Image (tube, helix red, strand yellow):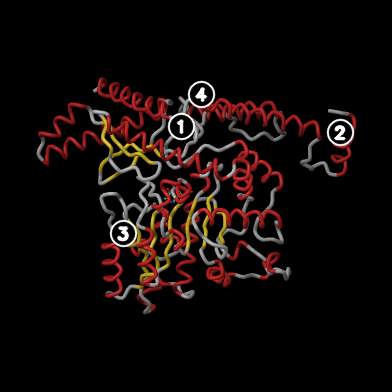
Amino acid sequence: MTDSSNKEVEEKRAARPSSLDISEDEFHAISESVAEIVEKYFARVAELPVFPDTSAEEISEKFPEKLSEDGEPIEKLIEDCRRVIEKSRHNGHPRFWGYVASPSTPIGAYADLIASALNQNVTSWRSAPAATMIEQQVMRWLGSLIGYDENAHGLMTSGGSLANLNALYVAHRVKSSGEVSHKGLWNRSAPMTVYASDQVHFSIPKAADVLGLGRENVRIVSSDERFKLDMRNLREQVERDEREGFIPFCVVANAGTVNTGAVDPLEEIGSFAQERDLWFHVDGAYGALGALAHEKRALFHGIARADSVSLDPHKWLYAPVDCGCLLFRDAARVQGAWTQHAADYIKVYEERDAESFAFWDYGIELSRRFRALKIWLMLRYYGSRKVSGAITDDCCMAQYFAERVEASEDFELLAPVELSICCFRYVPVEFAREFQAANDEERASLNEKLDELNAHIMHTVQRGGLAYLSNATLRARFALRACITNFRTTRADIDSTLEIIREAAREIRKER
Ligand SMILES: Cc1ncc(COP(=O)(O)O)c(C=O)c1O
């Protein structure tokens, strides 16, 4: 510590002993060691086990249980951060394809650091002028990527679940003119109903539950053999509900289902919603950014007709969690949805439009972190062409995965690859032969055995630390699921994972 820095700290501490300020030297020591951890992590992540070889007990033992009263030295804390890394599961590993989670980038990680240092509370322009305008700009960029025009607007959320909840709330308010529907029968106003395919993410029924719309008022529409919403069934259910006195108010389409990545027929759903005066929400939390892949663009035809779209940069824009987003096609239409909650302390005294802007007019949260910074910096750093290229390549990798599966005797593809998800299962060669000769009952029994074997394989592969797949249930069958939103994945990773799976299967079958 230099003399002047020492003196400054002493003076500050004399004026206020409880101050949490530290000297420049102390600050510098923290910065250097933190930057070193981050740099080393990014450089080494591909060599780390995807999942740590550890247990809950071992992790508890590694970290102090008792909170220090007098503070601990930075060296000790940095050492513990290294242990946290050692005991983590790594999205950034090239063979991590579980769930819908992408690696982050250095620029995204440092953007979060800047956002935390600045600590803007992005409630409104008056609280965070530049951050508010950057978030608005990012909303325009994301909107334009899916074909929205300048009337669109939106806000960043913690993720897709919150975006979907917010969307259903607004849909309900707009379509019910503020009345709460589920007061329902004893209020002589019929329940309002939402429609979504059997592949819908569980955050939609959960949102209906939270909003008091009633889980049972989310009507599940069947999907076709490609896991896309069946239009005929949608129409039948809406018409039946209308006949029976329910009030259909919203249809939710998937732009990339969580299970297989299927994109519902957006254009047709948009026309139907218009015909029936339904709010049209697209859950594109995982897949909407697939529209950046040139070859996939046709799948998204009609998305710009949606009243609202959920789209998560922390899923397929390689942004660090948390970073979701909800876009509205017509901002002016939705603003009123929240106005009944106005309170004196949020009265805005700014008079110019841009300066009186508040995100609380569009969403649930009041305090919000500066999430847009990581998108703003990341998109500008790489440029849209490079980011589109990464998304396109993710789709190509999933396609390659499917080709390898189909070319193998001992794997079976369980769903078409629409975006970047490949669902498949391991089928030992002798099972495949038995299948051919089996009757329905025997097949059901073989399928059960395969479900059990593949579940065991998934767990063994995950805990083995060489690759990470998750699971999906497709038409009641267990599927291994690789969701590739990972710019580090190469064809060689896919080839080696098929070998890793075979090896896990051999081990499991040997033990039986
Ligand atoms: C289609 C879809 N919608 C919503 C969500 C929920 O997003 P989050 O986990 O960010 O809340 C997911 C998560 O995987 C998803 O795939």
User: At 39% across and 29% down in the image, what residue appears?
Assistant: 494
User: At 61% across and 39% down in the image, what residue appears?
Assistant: 109
Kind of residue sitting beneath label 2: Ser
Which numbered disc, 2 or 1, marks the residue that appears first in the sequence? 2
Q: Is residue 47 above or below residue 17?
A: above
Which image quarter holds the C terminus? top left
Say which of 445 and 197 sits in front. Answer: 197
Kind of residue sitting beneath label 1: Thr
List the residue tagged with mark 2: 5
Could you tell me how far apart the alpha carbons at marks 2 and 1 are, in whole angstroms? 47 Å
List the residue tagged with mark 1: 489
Quadrant housing residue 267: bottom left
Residue 270 percent coordinates (x, y): 39, 64
**Mark 2 against mark 1, which lies toward the viewer?**
1
Residue 295 percent coordinates (x, y): 41, 46
Which numbered disc, 2 or 4, marks the residue that appears first in the sequence? 2
Q: For disc 1, does the CB lie below 8 Å from ligand 1? A: no
Residue 143 percent coordinates (x, y): 53, 57
User: 10 Å neighbourhood of mark 1: few (<14), some, or many (≥20)?
Assistant: many
List the residue tagged with mark 4: 47
Label 2: which secondary element: helix
Q: Is residue 302 above or below residue 512?
A: below
List the residue tagged with mark 3: 220
Quadrant housing residue 400: top left
Kind of residue sitting beneath label 3: Ile
Could you tell me how far apart the alpha carbons at marks 2 and 4 are, in whole angstroms? 41 Å
Tag 3–tag 1 contact (CB < 8 Å):
no
**Mark 3 against mark 1, which lies toward the viewer?**
1
In the rendered structure, find residue 349 and report the number of the disc placed on it.
none
